[in-house]
Image (cartoon, rainbow, N blue to C red):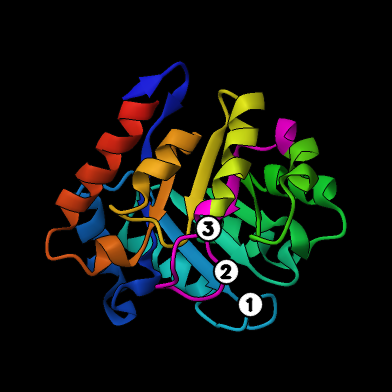
Amino acid sequence: MSCGKLQCKIGPSILNSDLSRLHEQSQKLLDSGADYLHLDVMDGQFVPNLTFGHPVVKCLRANIKTAFFDMHMMVAKPEQWVAPMADAGADQYTFHLEATQDPPALIRQIREAGMKVGVGIKPGTSVQDLLPLLDRVDMALIMTVEPGFGGQSFMADMMPKVEAIRSQYPDLDIEVDGGVGPASIDQCAKAGANMIVSGTAITKSADPKAVIDLLRASVVKHL
């Protein structure tokens, strides 16, 4: 499933799952072929919505031992939660460029805590602001909706950001998140995204495996 070092990875966002049955729903997504779980942490400050924090992640990790947890930290003070998330069992800590004054220091902090590093930007942030950091991270996240709420429409005009990163970093993981599903996957895959976050398109589907398979086929074709 790879081309060079790059692999297609499909990571359902569990935000639109039944959060009272988080373990069962997460396991169902993994059983349906998900490569990782995308966990949306919102603090009510960086974004208006409020979701869950490290205690929930720790409980989920106790029940799901091996899955890769990609933490999407939509929080105002990302430095504050690095140690608790590492302790909770997170594998990758993805912070927003807009939320920190000192990205290099935060990147070092995440690495020293034993996690992989992702960095993301909102739709209004220029990809040029992100490029200088990409030698130091494991993954770049391009938001294809305004962060904070599920179920928004996909913003196709974010694809040039993906293309710009892919042209300069052929082996970097590039994640897209927001409104991604069967109708928009080809645009993401053509632009060069290989890590696909999809929420409602997977979690609300009667056949999540079929949706994951469809998303994967598109990415593999374009890789």
Q: Nearer the viewer, residue 202 or 26?
A: 202
**Residue nearer the viewer, 204 or 41:** 204
- The tag earlier along the polypeptide, 2 or 1, is 1
Residues 68 and 146: in front is 146
**How crowded is the residue under tag 1: few (<14 C-alpha within 10 Å), some, or many (20+)?**
some
Q: Amino acid at mark 1?
A: Val
> How many C-alpha atoms fall within 10 Å of the one at disc 2: few (<14), some, or many (≥20)?
many
Which mark lies nearer to you, 2 or 3?
3
Mark 3 / mark 1, whichever is N-terminal: 1
- What kind of residue is marked 2? Pro
Residue 179's spot in the image, x, y percent?
A: 41, 62
Determine the main secondary structure of the stretch shown in magenta: loop
How many neighbours does mark 3 have within 10 angstroms: few (below 14), some (14-19), or many (20 or more)? many
Magenta includes 14? no
Under circle 1, the secondary element is loop
Mark number, residue 144: 3
Q: Residue at x 42, y 43 (%)?
A: 187
The image's mark for residue 147 is: 2
- Residue sticking out furthest to the left: 206
Please provide the residue range marked out in magenta.
134-156
